[in-house]
Amino acid sequence: MRILFVASLTHVEQLKQAVANTPPGQTAPLFPSSMKEHFYERALRRRGHELAVFWRERSSRNPRFRAGFTPAKAAQALVQRLPPQLNPQVHQRNRQLLQMVEEFRPDVLWLVAGNRVILPETLASIRQRHNCQLLYVGGESPLVFDYTLDNQAASLWDLALVNDYYHCFQLRELGTRQAISLPTTAMDPDFHFPRPLDDRRRTALACDVAFVGTLLPDHIYGERVRALAALRDFNPGIWSVHDLPPVLRPFLRGEALGEAMLDIVSAAKLTINPHGQTMQYGGNMRLFEAAGVGTLQITDDRPGIYKWFTPGENILTFRDEADLRDKVAYFLAHDDEREEMARRAREHVLAHHRYDQRVEQVETLLAAL
C-alpha cells in the first residue's frame, strides 16, 4: 500500500538530528523517535509499504508548555478563535496537501490526531476523487482536547484507531462509523530495550523512581502531579520538556525525549506512569515502552491494564497514594522480586505488544473495509 501520513511536527530538532545521522544509502526517517509514528514507519516499511508524510504544521522549535499567562498563549488563543476557513494560510496548506495527494496517489491517508489545519471538505474531496481510505489514529480524548476540525471530519473517516477504549464512544458520538482500541501504542524491540549505559552515564541518571513526561496543565495531568507529590520523600527523578508545578520543581533533572528517555528509564530502579485524567481506560506510550526497556513500572489502576498485562506478575498498579507509597517502598527494598517482575514484563511485551503486530492488525482492519 501507499500510505500518506498527515501530521504535525513539534520535535523539529530531534528529526533534524535523526536525518543528519542516517548512514549513507539508508532511508532517512520521516518522524522523530519521540513520536509513535516513527515506529509505525519502521514496521510499515518492513512490511513493504510505500510511505510519505505531509506536515500540516511545523514548529520552528520544540514547544514548551508553561503554567499561567504568556504572550505566546494569548497569540495562539487569538489565532484559534479565527475560523480556519477564514485563514489564508490554512487554505494554502490544504491546496498543498491536495497537490501532494495528486503526486503520491496514496491508498491510505493516515490522519494523526490533533488537526487544526486540514479542512473536512479537503478530506472529502480526497476520499471521493482518489478512492482513498481515511484512517484516523489518535491517543488523546477527542472531547477534552477539542480539535474542532478533527471532530467535524469524524463522519468521513473509514476507520478510527485509538489507545483508550473509552475514546471509541466519544468518536462514535461525533459520527465515526468504526472506532477501535488496539491500542495504537506498542514497543519496538530494536529501540525499546535495556540500554547499555557506561558507569558515568548510569551514575548521572541514577534514581530510585523515575518519571519522564508532561505534568501541565493540571486539568489534564493533575493525577500525575498528585501521585509524584506523594513520593517526594523517595526523591523521585523527573524529566520533562515542559514546566513543572511548584510542588515538583525541586525534583526536575532536565529534559528528555526519544533515546534519552530510554536511558533514564533504564538507569532507574522503578518508573512511575500515571496516565492522567483523559485516559481512564489506559494505554499511553510509556506503558509498553517502559516494559520493553526492562525496568519495573508502576501505573494507576486502569481497566486496560488488566487486558494488556497481569498486575502483580509483570506490572504494578496502585489504587491511591497510600497504596502507591507502600508498593514503591516494598519493591525498592526487594531487588530480586523487582528485577524478576521487570524481566517478565519485557518478555510479555516482546511476545504480544510489538509495533509489527499492531501493523498486522491495521492491515487486517483496512482490508475488511
Image (cartoon, rainbow, N blue to C red):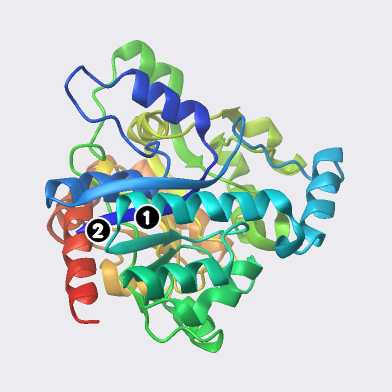
Residues at marks 2 and 1, CA–CA distance in whole angstroms: 48 Å
Q: Amino acid at mark 1?
A: Glu
Q: Local crowd at mark 2 within 10 Å, few (<14), some, or many (≥20)?
A: many
Between 172 and 134, the residue placed more toward the observer is 134
Sequence-wise, the earlier of marks 2 and 1 is 1
Look at 59% across and 55% down and name the residue there: 224
224 relative to 180 in the view: left or right:
right
Q: Local crowd at mark 1 within 10 Å, few (<14), some, or many (≥20)?
A: few
Between 235 and 130, the residue placed more toward the observer is 130
Report the disc number at residue 288.
none
Q: Amino acid at mark 2?
A: Asn
User: Is residue 68 at all visible to an observer of this figure?
Assistant: no
Which SS class for mark 2? loop
**Residue on which the image places disc 2:** 314
Residue 164 in the image: x percent, y percent?
A: 43, 71
**Residue on which the image places disc 1:** 102
